Amino acid sequence: MADHLNTIKDAVIGGKHGEIKALVQQALDAGTDPATLINDALIAAMDVVGKDFGEGKIFVPEMLVSAMTMKSGLEVVKPRLAGGESQSRGTVIMATVKGDLHDIGKNLVSMMLEGAGFKVLDLGVDLSVEKLVDQVKSVGPDVLGLSALLTTTMPEMQKVIAELKNQGLRDKVKVLVGGAPVDRAFAEKIGADGYGSNAAEAVELARRFASAK
Amino acid sequence: MELKPDFNRFLAAVRHQETDRVPLGEILIDYSVQSKFLGRTVTADDLAGQVEFWSKAGYDFIPITISMMSPGKVTEESKITRVLKEMVLRERPGTTDPKAWNLEMTSFIHERADLDKFPWEAAADIDFSKLHAIKPLLPEGMKVIAISGKIFTLTWMLMGFNNFALKLALDESFVAEVFERVATIQFKALESIFAMDHVAGVWVVDDIAFGTGTMISPAALKKHVFSWYRKVGERCHAHNRLFMMHSDGDLSAIMDELIDMELDAIQPIDPSCMDMAKVKKQWGERICLIGNVSNELLRSASTAQIEARVKELLRDAAPGGGFALGSGNSVPNWAKFENYMTMRETCLKHGRYPISIK
């Protein structure tokens, strides 16, 4: 079984998207437990990919191909799980704040979070404070991830946190911020719970937040 | 004290010479800041007001954006928008959301078949009227730097970032072809820019890096992006113009390549991930460095902290030339006005050569 898992893990890390479905099918046919396959091969591979990305060993294209490969593998496993769904590590709402149409960073983090086993609700770009807070209220996520690329839209993050406080939701969700102009000092100043300087750091923080709940 | 623009001062800094003082340099200063400085409203259409601001505030040039796709410039009236709207409605009759034909909000080139469907001719129809209109407004000694020529960002915007990145890994030659078409348009624009004597350089504003490094591998950048920028540099220098670049993020892994493609200056040396003193030490003799006062400081610091930071930068980066002081990105409307003023005033006061800050 270990051989199958290692082969699948290597295929995801290497972005072998054309081979992954057959490899996963072979492993399942050989009796590999679906949950083990997800956790010890697919998610474990994305952990390596995330770490390599964080360390600058691989770049966005390579990471995306690995994520795509992982998703293809997951599609084969999911029907074999009881209920057809794997157990989520937690729920994360992701969005780019009002006035900001940029979504590269947010999409990368969403993809990495999915790869790490989180349920991700990606609300897209240009999200108003009201919409974001409404979603937090109705979905009840473990983490709210806010992204901004523009220096002009960064202050929106502070408004979201203030509105969460106003509505008594602040202690119910961890707020994670990131984006090119954002830094740790800014995150601390606006009262965010965490700052991810890259996708891997964001995933690590989300893990920590979800497991502490 | 009345400040007079002198582009030779900036030129000398780029050539690593000391003149009377360290020049100031920005790619963008929000109109609200310009308005507050002048005590009257300055708008996007008020070229005279903009020239007055950049000149009186101590800058030797005014940056003017001229590009195929400039954020905020693609409007319903733009030719490219009209052509794309026709194309979208032909393919998907009944579409009503204007985002569907806005070049800044929708990507259009997903597969090879889209390459020939895209209205390249309309995209190449760039409006140079601002560059022409500004010429008679310039005071003596002041020049224009054209913000133009970006290739990397335009390519991924046309393709959508995820699609661009995936295709770069899976269908490299397709992406190379999009790069070539974008570069062809930008090169054509350069020829028009070079025909204007009052335009002294081209500033390519093209973010290629995150805080932790480049978005695509240095090897891919070299092959698909820098190969074009090398040609931009050659054309700029053949026409005796400066070739400058802006990119956020950590550029450490590609600084040697940037210098090799004969870039004259790089901005802003992103203060969230690059240390100006180290950059100056490692690469400062080979390229002019611009910027580095953190925008977070401009937003939240005291004027004393701004003054201290500017003095540090002058001490570390200004001796010997090769440095212009400015923000760590651009000057947004949320920067404290007094901090912006302190940044430039500290440079004007303590940036006089020879630098005597210990």
Image: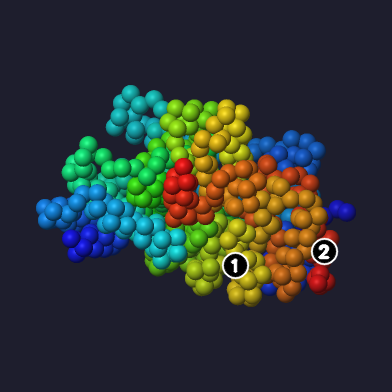
x and y, in percent, of residue A40 in the image = 28, 56
B281 sits left or right of A24 in the view: right
Numbered disc 1: what chain? Answer: B
> How far apart in space, not on screen, are marks 1 and 2 (Cα)?
25 Å
What residue is at 40 percent from the left and 37 percent from the top? A121
What residue is at 19 percent from the left and 51 percent from the top? A33
In the rendered image, the vertical position of residue A98 relative to residue A107, given as above or below: above
Numbered disc 2: what chain? Answer: B
Secondary structure beneath label 1? loop
Dots 1, 2 in contact, CB < 8 A: no
In the rendered image, the vertical position of residue A109 relative to residue A12, given as above or below: above
For the residue marked with disc 2, what is the amino acid? His
Residue underneath mark 1 = B264
Q: Which quarter of the figure is the N terminus of chain B placed in? A: bottom right
What residue is at 13 percent from the left and 54 percent from the top? A31
In the rendered image, which quarter is residue A6 located in?
bottom left
**Front one among B63 and B283:** B283
